[in-house]
Amino acid sequence: MSCVEVSQLRVELSGVRADIVDDVSFEIEHGEIVALVGESGSGKSTIGNALLGFARRGARIASGRVEIDGLSVLELGPPALRRARGRTVAYIPQDPSAALNPALRIGRQLEEGLERHNPQLSGAQRGEAIAAGLSEVDLPNGREFLRRYPHQLSGGQQQRIAIAMAFLLRPSVIVLDEPTTGLDVTTQRRVIETVRQLCERHGTSALYVTHDLSVVANLADRILVAYAGRIVETGPIDAVFAEPAHPYTRRLLAALPDVGSRRGLEPIPGRAPAPRARPSGCAFRERCEFAIGACATAPPAPVELPGGRSVRCLRVHELPSSAGLSPAPARAIPAQDTILIVRDLIASYGQHRVLHDVRFALGSHECLALVGESGSGKTTLARSIVGLLSSWQGEIVYAGGPLAPQVRARSSLIRRELQYVFQNPYSSLNPRRTIGDALSLPIEHFFHLRGRARRERIAGALERVSLPAAYADRYPDQLSGGERQRAAIARALVCQPRVLICDEVTSALDVSVQAAIVKLLHELQLEQGLALLFVTHDLALVRSIAQRVIVMHAGRIVETGETDAVLTQPSHEYTHRLLADTPRLVPAPTEPGVPVS
């Protein structure tokens, strides 16, 4: 008997018969890790939440069956369901702040679950269990650490606390919802290794929900590909990645960057349909290059393939082989005149020095990637340039003239031409104003446009980042994380900048939207001479977007050069380690004498 059995699951919007997910069936064996992948809006999180008998506000589980170790989750009453959550099925969110109470110390939060589900344990026994759980996720278990609050931990530490909380009760299955989004590659690898080891050690099954296919390439045993609320392809992960059968899976992989080669990223044309706007027949047919008239008649039934694979596609046996298909190489964009120069930059927070004698130059048309682990000084450098951090020494020259440290001391023209996109769109979008309001402010301030001209500028900016013009009337909380990030990028682009500083702007985006944003930035580099300072931890994406790369460690530049040269033949040990920690579709061969960790 499988650990998890999901059959004919359907989740609907409350009050209407529009499905969010429908006809979803799959199994997870004991100790197996299954990846659930797809674009934003594909229903991944909805399916994961259903394993806990939960549907978000505005939705309801209409029908189907979810069994975990023989326990029918959807038939449980509220008291029994509360007992099952945590003990039978646990959940690890994308944002650990959603699982950690900011007002409680870490030790107390770890103890709460044990008190609730294992009240027979003594205080000493709970302490021993907590110490063992923290040791398993490579965190200290001393009194000083347990007395910390969540804000006193790094993002990676917070995520490992959330993992420890989930495994403490030894659940049968764990649902992981994008647990490594926003983490640097070293922390990401540590989290993935922790999940793998704990699942093996305790025989725990896992459903790993993600938009990042490269993360699960060497973690999961099997893969479920979701599109428009249905599972369109399943199978062993190696087989699916080697030769994807469904046209949607092929397009997802074509949009995925790879650190091993410079490749042009191909976004999937169009958008995934919303629950109340899905076409008849195959939901992917309007975006599919292989669609025929029969694809519009009825949703395709699963077609079984050899090797335990299943695909929902009428033409699966007629399609050309996808083995060996790869995107075209990325276009080279030569740098033009130097537009930004940083000389001997030193930055501090109080008495703590963060940047040490940083110097580099950025040319128009150029994309310069800034990579390194969390805490390496990347964001401090970026914010110093844009004027959000004034406690620096040295010199920053823009368009031939020195920049004032504070943004308020800079001219209106410089503020318009030097734009910044934050990693977290919550930092830049006012929750009380619509997306249209957010884009209106810079349009009015810099261009003095109103009425129809302003509305057209807003609609055009949203369309360029793959958002419908109607989203101008929505508030930030009505958008997904990826949609909010695209809105933040649109707000920067309406300013028509000459230099765009992107701080981890693609970390929350699915691969197709990421490819669309990269393609847009390429076009702006070519057409308008846009210069990009691209702050990221994603070395695979760097290979596709950047002409040069700077590697930072502990506030210093440890390596710089042409992207292909640095990522193919790195000279610094720290760069070697970053490359070793970067997930790949195909594991890189280990070269003699090259350190890998």
Image (cartoon, rainbow, N blue to C red):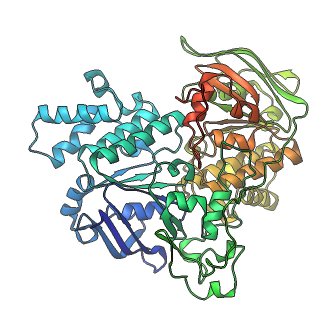
Quick check: can you spot residue 149?
yes
Quarter of the image containing the N terminus? bottom left
168 over 515 or under it: above or below:
above
473 over 492 or under it: above or below:
below
Towards the viewer: 379 or 366: 366
Pinpoint residue 70: horizontal percent, then vertical percent.
Answer: 23, 67
- Which residue in the rendered view is the most extreme toward the front? 592
496 over 62 or under it: above or below:
above
**Residue at coordinates 72% horizontally, 20% vertically from top-left?**
405
Quadrant for residue 388, please give it. top right
Pinpoint residue 355: horizontal percent, then vertical percent.
Answer: 63, 17
Quadrant for residue 65, please give it. bottom left
- Which residue in the rendered view is the most extreme toward the right? 337
- Number of labels in the image equals 0
Towards the viewer: 502 or 64: 64
**Residue at coordinates 42% horizontally, 40% vertically from top-left?**
193
Quick check: can you spot residue 377?
no
Pinpoint residue 224: horizontal percent, then vertical percent.
Answer: 48, 64
**Residue at coordinates 59% horizontally, 84% vertically from top-left?**
280
- Which residue in the rendered view is the most extreme toward the top? 351
Quadrant for residue 61, please give it. bottom left
277 over 327 or under it: above or below:
below
Towards the viewer: 446 or 594: 594
The answer to whether 160 appears left or right of 466 in the picture is left
Towards the viewer: 60 or 512: 512
**Residue at coordinates 35% horizontally, 70% vertically from top-left?**
6
Pinpoint residue 367: horizontal percent, then vertical percent.
Answer: 78, 37
